[in-house]
Image (cartoon, grey):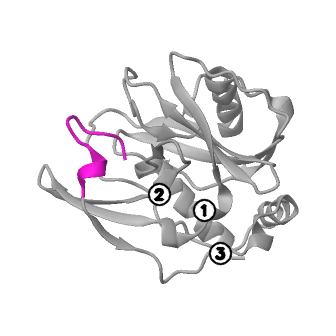
Amino acid sequence: MSNPPLFDPRTVPVVGRDVHLSAVPSEALQPAALRRYFAAPPVWSPELRAEPAFSNRTPTQASVLVPLVMRDTLTVLLTHRTSHLSSHSGQVAFPGGKADPEDTDAVATALREAQEEIGLSAAHVEVLGSMPTYTTGSAFVVTPVVALVSAAMVIEANPHEVAQVFEVPLPFLMNPANHRRHRVQWEGQEREWLSMPYHDGQMEHFIWGATAGMLRNLYRFLQAH
C-alpha cells in the first residue's frame, strides 16, 4: 500500500500476529532449493493480489527485483526510498519501477531499474522467476522478479531515488511470527495490511504494505512445496 497523504502506518494498531503459521524450513531457503522450486513451480495461490484503490489514474505496469543475496544465510536486499519522490516516498521498497517502452518484458524492467536505482549489474543477478502481479492502491500493477544475487555485487545507490540500501535475513521474513496485521478505517473504507519491522541494531526498518504483501506471497509460494 502506498502512503496516502498524512498517513503514518506506524501509528496504526497491530490487530494480530501470525504466530500460528509455520516458518519456511531452513533447507527450503538455500539457493539450490530455490532454483528447483522456481524451475518446477507448485500449484498455489497468492494470498494478496490487490490493495483498495485510492488513485483514479490508469493502471501502470511495473516490476520490482526481489534480490536474494547469497551470503551464508540468504538475505533480501531492500531500499529506503527518498522522501521527495512522487510515489511511495520514504518507504521501504524493492528496487524497481514502472515499465519503459523499450523494456522487452517484466524481467527487463526489474533489471534495468535495479541498475538505475542501486547500480546492481545484471552480471551479478541470476533470475529465478516471476511471482503473480500485485496491484498497489496507487494503481501500479507490479510483477515481482525473484533472483539470486552474488555477494560480490557492487552497490551504488542513486541518491535521487534511494536514501539507504540494507539487507534482512530471508529466514526472518519467511517466518510468519514476524508478520503483523494492521487495520484502520480511512476515507470510509476498512484497510488492512501486513508489516514486518526489522531491527538491525541501529534502526528499525518498517517493511509494510506492498513490499510486505509481496514477501508474504513469496512465503506462500515456498510453503506450497
Asked if disc 2 and disc 1 are in contact, CB closer than 8 Å, the reply is yes
Q: Residue 148: where, in percent of width, then height?
A: 79, 47
State how many labels appear: 3
Classify mark 1: residues with Cα within 10 Å, few (<14), some (14-19) or many (20+). some
Q: Is residue 129 magenta?
A: no
Circle on res. 223: 3
Q: Earlier in the sequence, mark 2 or mark 3?
A: 2
Q: Earlier in the sequence, mark 2 or mark 1?
A: 1
Gap between marks 2 and 1, in whole Å? 9 Å
Classify mark 3: residues with Cα within 10 Å, few (<14), some (14-19) or many (20+). some
Q: Answer yes or no: is residue 53 visible.
A: no
Gap between marks 1 and 3, in whole Å? 15 Å
The amino acid pointed to by label 2 is Met
Say which element carries label 2. loop
Circle on res. 196: 2
Q: Answer yes or no: is residue 56 visible.
A: yes
Circle on res. 172: 1
Q: Residue 179: where, in percent of width, then height?
A: 46, 65
Q: Earlier in the sequence, mark 1 or mark 3?
A: 1
